[in-house]
Image (spheres, rainbow, N blue to C red):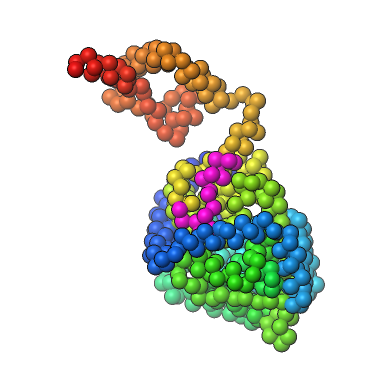
Amino acid sequence: MTRNPLVGELPFPEAARHELSREQLRRNLRSATHTIRDKRARTVAEVPDWEELRVAGSAIKADVLARLPELLTRFEAAATAAGARVHWARDAAEACAIVTRLVGETGTDEVVKVKSMATQEIGLNEALEAAGITALETDLAELIVQLADDAPSHILVPAIHYNRSEIRDIFRERMAGADPGLTDDPHALAEAARRHLRERFLAAKVAVSGANFAVADTGTLVVLESEGNGRMCLTLPETLISVVGIEKLVPTFADLEVFLQLLPRSSTGERMNPYTSMWTGVTPGDGPQDVHIVLVDNGRTATLADEVGRQALHCIRCSACLNVCPVYERVGGHAYGSVYPGPIGAVLTPQLTGVAANRSLPFASTLCGACFDVCPVRIDIPQVLVHLRQQVVDERRGHPSAERTAMRAATWIMGAGRRYTRILRIARWATRPLAALLRRRTVRRLPWPLSAWTAERDAPLPAGESFRDWWARSREGS
């Protein structure tokens, strides 16, 4: 197993075309996404006020973004008063430098990690490795991906693109001390991972985490998980470093009530997460005694300035949009070339890193709207996608393109009724021999530049009879 070369290397259309050829990948994705979304639908149906909860979650997030500087200052003051040390990072490089320095000051060369999208976003593992520090992922799926030298392909289930047999092979080949006779039974695989991690937990001096939520009033951080590995990381080491995006705030502790209902049902289809860990600074004699919080911007302030696009910062990383997306289900996460795949990645990544660097991602969608229907905080992803597509078009304005030339020609043709009717009749007459030869009214391949259309879809030939001609003929016969 080696790192997928498509991650960050190719534009989405090219990467997606490659991934579509992997039949086993498509089977794995279809099975996993359908299982998760069906379970989610059942647990959501149990909640009579689900839509009201979605509205409340969206309102809380909108309030946070409207008062972000104030709430960040309040959070820093509360966390500092509780014994934590708060650090500010403008971008990924600064965040990685802070964490690397803090780990270096402890004298250790290994850290254990709680599953964290923020640390993936900033490339923390790679930065620590460059400094001679090993970062060990403790989440089972993240561990699988790390052992395979691969990249995550799903927000919630990073190893969703592997089946049990493939995971067994990864463990046999890459996991130190793994039983050569290890089977693909889920219990056996989980036990192998548990044995592999146990000694690391007990010996770890430093842990690195993210946070699902950060409470401004109290300085509390919150992590939700299903396995308990995170709880081990958050309680056993002497030093805890949490990397948190500045949008993860909620104003008060009471606001968590809404999200602790929305997130579990939307992500894992559970009524509540098996492990919900909360900590506020340092508690003498209990848990880590050296607690750091790194608040990361990394493009979030720029995203906040976009009145339409800022709603992407509402995201609570549940991944429900991935599980219902027809595009994601067929190509998987690697095709997006981003830490954040799927519909939310198609709107969040271009804003965090710049639309110019991710021109193809806003087009990685059918605009079917399923992502908005399941989003627990009502992010209108189709609206943001169209908004970002407009930015791509505006950026290219003034540069000649076959598409723009074709649209201008179509505008001229359709600008006058008589002209349009006349040209349509000519086209219908000219294509009759081709339709008779093909015995169908679609063309599967056209020469350049029209090949850009038929590379993805068939091109329809003009109808044998227009509606206007049919209407006139019908009226004559009546």
In the image: residue 161, left or right of residue 11 = left
Residue beneath the point at 42% across and 60% down = 37
Residue 22 visible here: no
**In terms of depth relative to the viewer, which is nearer, 447 or 279?**
279
Q: Main secondary structure of the magenta part?
A: helix
User: What is the x, y in percent for residue 31?
Assistant: 39, 58
Which residues, given as a range, are shown in magenta?
A: 373-388
Residue 423 in the image: above or below residue 286: above
Query: Residue 471 colored magenta?
Result: no
In the image: residue 449, left or right of residue 282 = left
Q: How many numbered badges does the structure rendering display?
A: 0
Query: Residue 387 colored magenta?
Result: yes
**In terms of depth relative to the viewer, which is nearer, 283 or 130?**
283
**In terms of depth relative to the viewer, which is nearer, 145 or 42?**
42
User: What is the x, y in percent for residue 64?
Assistant: 65, 60
Residue beneath the point at 68% across and 79% down = 237
Residue beneath the point at 71% across and 83% down = 283
Quadrant of the image for the C terminus?
A: top left
